[in-house]
Each structure stands twice: as structure tokens, then as C-alpha cells.
Image (cartoon, rainbow, N blue to C red):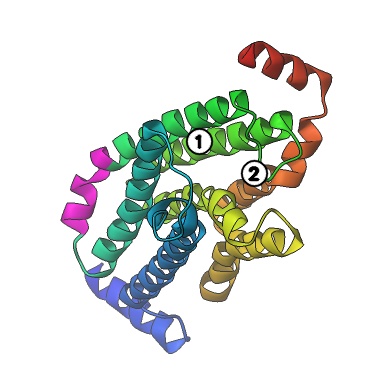
């Protein structure tokens, strides 16, 4: 049996298929690169209003916004660290940190939802037309983040599914960060978001000739939570009624 497996592996390499170790190394490079790209976008997007606020003489922010910013920053750094650990052979520590990741993700959902409601009550809805559309986008993205994280942790023993779900969960930081970086949600922002969303499926096609099932259902949901669809949903009478009751 072992000899047959070795022969099969040699045959695959002779047919032009990379070895399993090479596939893992290539995957690690791709996912780490995506983690760096998202981290760079988040830090660039919030430099003026948070990370280098004093340098740019931006207005003071309340304590609860600081807490929100620290938790979101911790998640971005945690995701980057986990990818670096996987790439450089630290899988034992990577797995041990899973509980911390779950706790951080819970904080992201709770604080993200709470700050969206608080800002809505204070009349803050930039870059959206009104509070209804702002909350439609925020609630939709926080709900999808929670779904990706839940299934990502539940299926953590399935590495192929796990890493795709966690990557897609981090994509939900795109619009808060890149929207600020690019001065609002415009056509360029939307096209760049699609480039991020489809990077994984395109990578799968190039390396495996097949798009993984996690992307097949996850990417359409990411697209449905993009701001234009949230704005459309916000015009529904039922949604406006619910938001009016929530903010009353």
C-alpha cells in the first residue's frame, strides 16, 4: 500500500501535478499575502482617524470607540499572525490560539454591532445616504462575519475549508477601511472589493482547476452584503419600521 502511494505521488509529479508539500507552501504564501493586503488597507484607512489621529489633528474620540478600534485591530493582527505561523511551521501554536481567535471574533461582532447602533443614534451614517442604509450594511456584514467564523471554527479540522472561511470573514473589514481610504463607497471601491473577493476563487482555478465549495457559497454572500444591496434593502418598509423601533 505504501509503495502504491509513493508510485501514485511520483506519477502525479510526472504528469505535471505539484507535490502536496509544494501546494501547502504555495497556499501559505497566498493566504499570508492576502492577510498583509487586508492589514495594510485597514491601517491605511484608519490612519487619519485612529492610528495617527494626533498627528493629523483629528477630533478626539470616545473611550468606547477606542475599545472598538483595539478589538478590530487585534483581530487583523491575529489573522496575520496565524497565517505567518502556518507558513513558518508553527501549526501547534496556531491551533492553540484558536480559543483566543474565537473570543476576539465574538468581540468584533458585539462591538461592531453596538457601535453601529450608537453611531446611528447620534446621526452618523457616512458614507451612506441615511441611517437605514448604514445599519443594513453594518448588520449584514456583522452577521456574515459571525457565520464565517462559526463555520470556520467548527470545520477547523478541514484545513481547506477553514482557511477559506476565515479569509472571507476578514474581507468584511474591507468597506470600513477602504471606504475611508478611498473617500467613500464609489465605483473604484466596489471594483477593488470584487478583486479581493474573487482572488481566492481565481487562485483555486489556477492551482486546482476547481473552485472550493466554501467560495461557491461564501463569495455570493459577500457580494450581497456590499453597500449597493444594503441601500436597496434599506428602502423596505419593514426594515425602516424595525430600525425606528430599535433606535426609539
Identify whether 37 is placed above or below 176.
below
Report, in whole angstroms, how far the alpha carbon at label 1 lies from the one at label 2: 11 Å
**Cβ–Cβ under 8 Å for marks 1 and 2:** yes
Residue at 51%, 74% in the rendered image:
207
Left or right: residue 21 compared with residue 60: left
Q: Position of residue 35 (x, y in %)?
A: 41, 62
Q: Which residues fall within the magenta stretch?
A: 91-100
The residue carrying mark 2 is 221
Residue at 42%, 36% in the rendered image:
65
Taking depth in this image into account, of 245 and 205 the one nearest to the observer is: 245
Question: So how many labels did they put on this image?
Answer: 2
Which image quadrant for residue 243?
top right
Q: Position of residue 148 (x, y in %)?
A: 48, 41
For residue 105, say whether it is visible: no
Q: Main secondary structure of the magenta part?
A: helix
Taking depth in this image into account, of 128 and 167 the one nearest to the observer is: 128
Identify whether 231 is placed above or below 23.
above
Q: Residues within 10 Å of mark 1 (few under 14, many from 20)?
A: some
Taking depth in this image into account, of 88 and 136 the one nearest to the observer is: 136
Q: Which mark is residue 147?
A: 1
Q: Residues within 10 Å of mark 2 (few under 14, many from 20)?
A: some
Q: Which mark is residue 100?
A: none
In which quadrant of the rendered image does the C terminus lie? top right
Q: Position of residue 215 (x, y in %)?
A: 57, 53
For residue 100, say whether it is visible: yes
Left or right: residue 245 compared with residue 8: right
In which quadrant of the rendered image does the N terminus lie? bottom left
Q: Please tell me whether residue 133 belongs to the stretch shown in magenta.
A: no
Q: Residue furthest front?
A: 57
Amino acid at each position: 500500500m505504501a509503495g502504491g502511494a509513493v508510485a501514485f505521488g511520483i506519477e502525479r509529479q510526472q504528469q505535471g501535478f505539484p507535490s502536496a508539500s509544494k501546494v501547502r507552501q504555495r497556499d501559505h504564501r497566498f493566504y499570508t499575502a492576502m492577510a498583509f493586503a487586508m492589514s495594510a488597507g485597514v491601517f491605511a484607512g484608519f490612519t487619519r482617524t485612529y492610528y495617527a489621529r494626533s498627528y493629523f489633528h483629528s477630533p478626539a474620540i470616545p473611550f468606547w470607540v477606542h475599545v472598538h478600534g483595539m478589538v478590530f485591530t487585534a483581530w487583523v493582527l491575529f489573522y496575520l499572525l496565524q497565517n505567518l505561523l502556518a507558513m513558518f511551521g508553527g501549526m501547534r501554536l496556531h491551533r492553540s490560539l484558536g480559543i483566543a481567535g474565537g473570543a476576539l471574533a465574538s468581540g468584533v461582532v458585539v462591538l461592531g454591532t453596538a457601535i453601529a447602533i450608537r453611531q446611528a443614534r447620534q446621526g452618523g451614517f457616512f458614507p451612506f445616504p441615511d441611517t437605514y442604509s448604514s445599519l443594513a450594511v453594518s448588520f449584514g456584514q456583522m452577521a456574515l462575519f459571525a457565520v464565517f467564523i462559526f463555520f470556520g471554527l467548527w470545520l477547523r479540522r478541514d484545513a481547506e475549508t477553514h482557511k477559506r472561511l476565515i479569509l472571507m470573514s476578514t474581507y468584511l473589514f474591507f468597506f470600513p477601511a477602504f471606504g475611508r481610504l478611498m473617500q467613500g463607497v464609489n465605483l473604484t471601491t466596489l471594483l477593488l472589493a470584487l478583486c479581493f473577493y474573487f482572488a481566492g476563487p481565481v487562485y483555486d482555478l489556477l492551482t486546482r482547476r476547481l473552485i472550493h465549495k466554501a467560495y461557491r457559497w461564501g463569495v455570493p454572500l459577500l457580494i450581497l452584503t456590499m453597500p449597493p444591496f444594503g441601500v436597496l434593502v434599506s428602502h423596505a418598509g419593514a426594515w425602516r419600521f424595525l430600525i425606528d423601533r430599535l433606535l426609539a
